[in-house]
Image: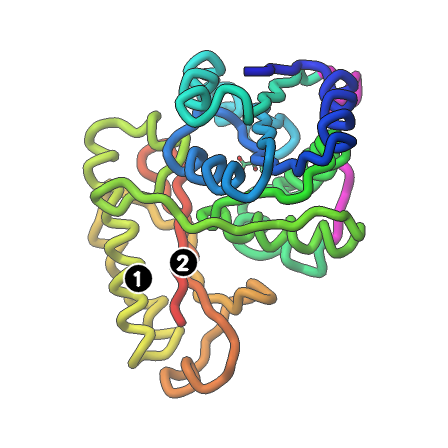
Amino acid sequence: MKNFQNKTELSNFIGTLKANGNTIGFVPTMGALHNGHLSLVRKGLVDNDIVVVSVFVNPTQFDNKEDLNTYPRTLEADIALLKTLSNDQIIIYAPTEDDIYGNQVESQHFSFEGLEHEMEGAFRDGHFDGVGTIVKRLFEIVTPDRAYFGEKDFQQLQIIRKLVELYSLSVEVIGCPIHRAEDGLAMSSRNERLTPVHRNIAPFIYETLTTAKLKFGTESAKDVTEWVYEQFKKQPLLKLEYFNIADIATLKPIKQTASDNFRDNKSYRAFIAVYAGDIRLIDNIALN
Ligand code: PAF
């Protein structure tokens, strides 16, 4: 399996592959790969001749130094996992910070038509500037035909779509369904850092989301939201940071009445962020 640390060598190699008629899929990751990532790579392998997987813990998207320092880095295990999918159709790009940022580890500032101010943007200062910066740079290096992102980070997915639109980038962005453990917990590299007690209680997040979805059929967004906040008050091991029902196009929270929920032709999702001890987990569910 080819493994590049240097962007120029990678770009040259991809240039030759493309000149020979190969299509390129791209799965950007921060490593600590799990089945959720593998499902993106599998989809990439079906759609393209070659899939590039980047493994880079991007410092500019972390608003919390502790989270950045403790983020799992497991490159050898990641490579071994990718090899189980394909040895010759996958290319790894695991750059150093210097290869991406040189001596300026800074974000570009973006305006994503307000998408960046909602939810994760409101709670994680500068997060989407960091994501926009790294994804734009990676797209320039990899020049993929298609790029794959999980719907667990649904706000990120919408922001990447906006990035592609605003900068007229010639890449197709493909959103892929959330991968869950058997007990419903959305797969995340952060799950490895949960204590056994918190891991045990964490499926409560998805259970609450599925009940919220049922309630959305008959109750207003405001009532469903209040109900979710009540449930988490009874759950001392989990701290709810936010729960929102939002229009997926604007990501703005809605407060409409139950009868309105299915009358318009908009799509709604419920979004949640929860602390399980020190670990911050996010999840979401389509409501209609
Ligand atoms: O979703 C992630 O893992 C990261 O935000 C991404 C897209 C790899 C950018 O660092």
Type of amino acid at the residue the image marks with label 2: Phe
Q: Crowding near pointer 2: few (<14 within 10 Å), some, many (20+)?
A: many
Task: Name the quadrant where ligand 1 sits.
Answer: top right
Image side of residue 31 versus residue 208, left or right: right
Q: Which residue is mark 1?
A: 228
**Where is residue 24, by image quadrant?**
top right
Q: Which residue is mark 2?
A: 243
Type of amino acid at the residue the image marks with label 1: Val
Range of residues picked out in magenta: 98-111
CB within 8 Å, label 2 to label 1:
yes
Q: What residue do we see at 20% from left, 53% from top?
A: 234
Q: Secondary structure at mark 1?
A: helix
Q: What residue do we see at 53% from left, 48% from top?
A: 120
Find residue 193 and report its horizontal and vertical position in percent.
Answer: 34, 26
Q: What residue do we see at 39% from left, 74% from top?
A: 222
- Residue 72, magenta (yes or no): no
In this orientation, does residue 218 appear? Answer: yes
Marks 2 and 1, how far apart in space?
7 Å
Image side of residue 15 versus residue 158, left or right: right
Q: What residue do we see at 79% from left, 17% from top?
A: 103
Relative to residue 102, is residue 120 depicted above or below? below
Q: Secondary structure at mark 2?
A: strand
Find residue 260 and report its horizontal and vertical position in percent.
Answer: 43, 85
